[in-house]
Image (cartoon, helix red, strand yellow):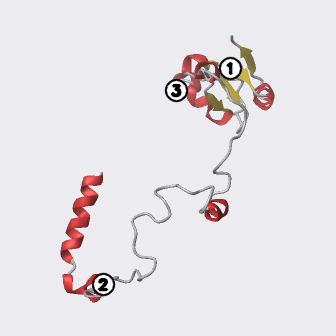
């Protein structure tokens, strides 16, 4: 990380001859290009993001719109468990089946896919299915997923 970058900068610094450095031209210049009136000070505009709502407001409004303020409602003690809902699209549905179940699948012998045992709760409708019926068990189905599964002669089984 930072140690390697520091060492690299040291190596780079040592390769440049001193007599070519810009500062050599400034020797004896007393103010070194910073002027006599508003001299070189440490942090004239404040450190870091200071002044974003005051003297640096134009920059913040122009280049970082929406940086300040709030949005939405607060949710106290939000537990993520109840929102856990991994999804799968129809085009990836058959990849959840084992290889032998895929090979043996025919119109008369529809494979049963238990999505929950594969760690998937919700089936989404993106993509097309092969024209072989499949029985899919899941907690949730979108309307389009349900429609496309039924179009190929399959079935959607809701599991709590």
Q: Quick one: SS at disc 1?
A: strand
Number of marks: 3
Q: Quick one: SS at disc 3?
A: helix
How many angstroms separate mark 3 from mark 2 (CA)?
79 Å
Callout 2: 10 Å neighbours few (<14), some, many (20+)?
A: few
Q: Is residue 16 left or right of residue 125?
A: left
Q: Marks 3 and 1: CB-CB under 8 Å?
A: no
Q: Which residue is mark 3?
A: 99
Image spot of residue 105 (x, y percent): 63, 23
Name the residue located 56 percent from the left edge and 16 percent from the top edge: 117
Sequence-first disc among 3 and 1? 3
Image spot of residue 106 (x, y percent): 67, 23
Image spot of residue 2 (x, y percent): 29, 53
Write down the quadrant of residue 153 in the picture.
Answer: top right
Write down the quadrant of residue 4 in the picture.
Answer: bottom left
Sequence-first disc among 1 and 2? 2
**Image height of 68 relative to 149, above or below:** below
- Foreground residue, 65 or 151? 65
Callout 1: 10 Å neighbours few (<14), some, many (20+)?
A: many
Q: Which residue is mark 2?
A: 30
How many angstroms separate mark 1 from mark 2 (CA)?
80 Å
Q: Which residue is mark 1?
A: 136
Query: Mark 3, mark 2: which one is toward the viewer?
Result: 2
């Amino acid at each position: 990380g930072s140690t390697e970058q520091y060492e690299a900068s040291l190596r780079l610094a040592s390769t440049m001859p001193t007599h070519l450095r810009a500062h050599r031209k400034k020797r004896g210049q007393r103010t070194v290009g910073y002027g006599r009136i508003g001299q070189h000070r440490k942090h004239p505009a404040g450190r870091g993001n200071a002044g974003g709502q005051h003297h640096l407001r134009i920059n913040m409004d122009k280049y970082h719109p929406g940086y300040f303020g709030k949005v939405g409602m607060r949710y106290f003690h939000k537990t993520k468990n109840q929102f856990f809902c991994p999804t799968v699209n129809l085009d990836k549905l058959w990849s959840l089946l084992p290889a032998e179940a895929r090979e043996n699948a025919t119109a008369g012998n529809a494979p049963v896919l238990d999505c929950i045992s594969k760690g998937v709760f919700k089936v989404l409708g993106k993509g097309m299915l092969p024209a072989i019926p499949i029985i899919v068990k899941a907690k949730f189905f979108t309307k389009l997923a349900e429609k496309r599964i039924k179009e190929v002669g399959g079935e959607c089984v809701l599991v709590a």
